[in-house]
Image (cartoon, coloured by chain):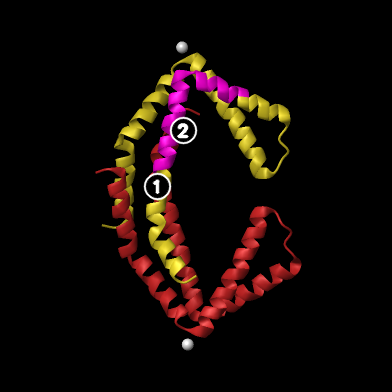
Chain colours: A red, B yellow
Amino acid sequence: MSIYEVAYNLEKAIRQSEEFQRLKKMYEDIQHDETSSRMFNNFRDIQMRLHQKQMTGEEILQEEIEQAQKMAALVQQHDKIAQLMELEQRMSFLIAEVNKIVLKPLEELYNKFE
Amino acid sequence: MSIYEVAYNLEKAIRQSEEFQRLKKMYEDIQHDETSSRMFNNFRDIQMRLHQKQMTGEEILQEEIEQAQKMAALVQQHDKIAQLMELEQRMSFLIAEVNKIVLKPLEELYNKFE
Ligand SMILES: [Ca+2]
Ligand SMILES: [Ca+2]
C-alpha cells in the first residue's frame, strides 16, 4: 500500500477510535449547553492569547497569569469541561505517539549518520 | 484495527517507499565519501547553528548569513548533495501530507465548534 493509502486508513482509525468518539461527544455536549460553552470558549480564548504572547515573545502581565489560573481552577470544577480536557490530553498523547512512530524511519536514518 | 496497528503499518509503508529508500541510499553514498560527507556535515552544522539562533532570538551576524549562502551555493554544485537535498525536501513534503491527513478528524472537530 502507498503511504497515502495507509495515512487515510490511519485517519479512519482515529475517527473511529473510542478516544475520538468520546471527545467528539463531549464537545457536542458542552457546545449545546450555553453556560458550559461560554465558560469553555472563554478559557480557550485566554489560553490562546497567552500562547500567542509566548510565541511572539510579547510580555505576559501578572494579571493575565492570575486570570488564566483562576479560569483553569474554575473549569476544573466543571465536570464536563474537566472531562473534555482529560479526553483532549489523551488525544494529544495518541497523536504524539503516532508522530513518533511515523518519524522513526527518518530518525534512525539521521542518527546513523550523526 | 487500532490506531497503533495502523500507525505501525504507516511506518512500514514509509520505510518501504521508493522515496525513503532513495533518501537512505543517497545518505549512505555521501557518508561513504569523505569529501562529500565533510562538505555536507559542514553545511548541516551551519544551518543548525542559524536555526538555533533564530529559535532563541540570538543575533545572526551578516558574516554568518554570507557563509551560509556561500555554503548553500557550494553544495548545490555538488551533484550528490543537491540530489540528497531534493530527496529530503520530497520526504518532508510527504511527512507534512501525512500529518495533514492524520490531523483532519481533530481539525474538523475544532472548526465545527469555533
Ligand atoms: Ca442551554
Ligand atoms: Ca573516501
Labels 1, 2: front one: 1
Q: Which mark is residue B108?
A: none
Q: Which residue is more in the foreground, A91 or A27?
A: A27
Residue under the point 33% across and 31% down: B21
Residue under the point 51% across and 75% down: A82
Whether B7 is drawn above or below B23: the answer is below
Residue B42 visible? The answer is: no
Q: Element under label 1?
A: helix
Q: Which residue is more in the foreground, A77 or B31?
A: B31
Name the side, left or right, on which B69 lies relative to A98.
right
Asked if residue B74 is among those painted magenta in the image, a careful observer would answer: yes
Q: Position of residue A35 (x, y in %)?
A: 53, 84
Which residue type carries mark 2? Tyr
**Is disc 1 surrounded by few (<14), some (14 to 19) or many (20+) residues within 10 Å?**
some
Residue B20 visible? The answer is: yes
Q: Label 2 belongs to which residue?
A: A110
**Is disc 2 surrounded by few (<14), some (14 to 19) or many (20+) residues within 10 Å?**
few
Quadrant of res A47:
bottom right
Name the side, left or right, on which B65 lies relative to A97.
right
Asked if residue B60 is among those painted magenta in the image, a careful observer would answer: no
Quadrant of res A68:
bottom right
Whether B103 is drawn above or below A40: the answer is above
Q: Position of residue B108 (x, y in %)?
A: 41, 64
Residue stretch rendered in magenta on the structure? B70-94
Residue under the point 38% across and 54% down: B102
Q: Which residue is more in the foreground, A106 or B73?
A: B73
Q: Position of residue A39 (x, y in %)?
A: 56, 79
Q: Which mark is residue B97?
A: 1
Name the side, left or right, on which B110 lies relative to A17.
right
